[in-house]
Amino acid sequence: MHIVTLSAANLFKDGKTDYSIVVAQDASESEKTAAKELAMYLKQISGAEFPVTNNLNRSGKCLFVGYNARTAQMAGMSKPAADDETFVYKTVGDNLLVFGGSKRGTMYGVFAFLENELGVRWYTADYTKIPKRKAFTFNNIHRSEKPALKLRYPMYYVCTTNPAWAAHNRSNYNWNAQKNQYGGREACLGAHTLGTYIAADDYWDSHPEYFAERNGKRTKNAQRCLSNNDVLNITIKKTLQSIKSNPDYLYYDVSQLDNNDFCECKKCKAIEQKYGSEHSGIILWFVNKVAEAVEKQYPGKKVCTLAYQYGRTAPKNIVARKNVAIRLCTNNCCRSHALETCPENASFKKDLQGWSRCAQELMIWDYVANFYQYNTPYPNFATFADNLDFFARNNVSATLLLGQYQSASGEFNELKAWMLAKLLWNPKQDVDKLAKEFISDYYGAASSYVFSYYQLCKNLAKSDLHLKNGIEANSPLFTDSFIAESEKLLDRAYRKCKTQQERNRVEDVQAQILSLRVGRTSLKSGSGDLRLRYNNYLKKRTPRINENQTTEEYFKQIGDI
């Protein structure tokens, strides 16, 4: 980031402006969207009308959006690559220039200007903070930013389902590829695809040799035999068909099934021994061959594979082709302490550094929610910045953070989605500062007590307990004193609320402790009043209970329909 303060000029004053917004006629769709939204937000902030024009020779004071002949002349900088998301906004005389790569870089620059200089925040799908101002004086800023990670996806429901929220918070990666007015989002098609490409229903009866040998026998539900040439040829054919049928994706998955039953046949073992006796060696050898065939027909596309479970450790004596992306998963890691420093994560740290040396493009699939109980506290805040910074320093280009992706509910889901989006762009930011900013704006009059509760939760991570992908309500992490103090803080927060909206938001936070207390009783017993309160909350908000259970399914389970 580069910031230089130069001089001063008025952008608007008392509902009036001398400025026009200029965007080239041949600008990209996202740049035109950014220019339109810049005018919209400036009007909401100031009350002034900012006309949008395509006339690059416009006289007078201008806000130029995008790299074009006029900005090139004034900026004295070369044209960025279309996919370069680095942006610059700077003043030249009385003019403001905002430009970056045409795909999304310029757009991010416009949104950053609105954030950094005017205080706009896109917190949730239905809450954007737009400050009102009578005047704004330019301090003639020269600011440049570059993302720490190339592809960024806080996989919460709001990000997955709301392209506008994602774009405003600079998330450019998604579960499904998208084309939209914000420059779209990149994606990887599929996961565990070898189970689909070499499906048991299609091949087991006629070709058992396609399936892994386990204890001397071919096994139907095991992995596939990657040394078998037919398996390779079928996979190449089906990968090419997948690309042809789904051209909007950048990455196409070719990866193992979700089990540990790797092939033990002599040919597979021989290939593994060649690459350091790691199971990942034959996987990468196989995927490289698929990627070689893909490059011949689709030179712009990439093949992605999982470094997961038995194949997580990097191989030796082999490197990934330039069009192969390795998607390394953080399964079985501690979630309450940093990946780089916690002894529980030593094997993952070694694996990450190993893949960093042999893969030109390394992606991370990380887990940031309590998948056992979505609504109970999950004290992993302290790991967010450290982990993302660790990734950025080790050749990671893309990170998917798997959160509460199934519904717009769950423990601090609004805060975590926004916070993680910010940290994916720049992990050097202070987590508590981000949390305080969000909580102050989102919870209003109740914010001081909600922030104290957030700190109480965050500080649970000092425990010697190492959280995995989930934690049960009866964990010793949640002491009686923690529960009592939390209830006291949140009761005070609720009493401070001035609007029904604030009360609703605080109720969602109170539900964390309510869910925790109910979860510590047997399913159909415990305090009747406690369970009644929890059931009433569930009926009112219908949050998802966990990854595998909806509210409706929960009520069927406990007999309260």
Image: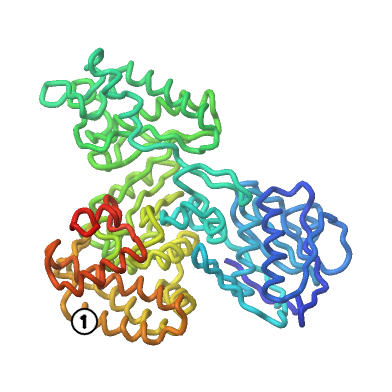
Q: Image quarter for residue 145?
A: bottom right
Q: Is residue 9 visible?
A: no
Colour mode of the rendering? rainbow
Q: Position of residue 103 (x, y in %)?
A: 63, 48
Relative to 288, say whether 25 is above or below.
below
Which sits in the foreground, 138 or 289? Answer: 138
**Which residue is label 1 attached to?**
484
SS for dot 1 = helix
> Which residue: 53% across, 59% down?
165
> Which residue: 65% across, 47% down?
81
Tag 1: residue type?
Ala
Classify the position of the C terminus by image quarter.
bottom left
Q: Can residue 271 be seen in this view?
A: yes
> Which residue: 26% across, 65% down?
336
Classify the position of the N terminus by image quarter.
bottom right
> Which residue: 26% across, 52% down?
553
Q: Where is residue 357 in the image (x, y as percent from the top left)?
A: 38, 44
Mark 1 neighbour class, 10 Å CA radius: few under 14, some 14 to 19, many 20 or more: few
Q: Residue furthest top?
A: 206
The answer to whether residue 387 is left or right of residue 221 is right
Q: Where is residue 387 in the image (x, y as percent from the top left)?
A: 36, 60
Q: Image quarter for residue 37?
A: bottom right
Q: Position of residue 365 (x, y in %)?
A: 36, 49
The answer to whether residue 103 is left or right of residue 430 is right
How many marks the image carries: the answer is 1
Q: Image quarter for residue 72?
A: bottom right
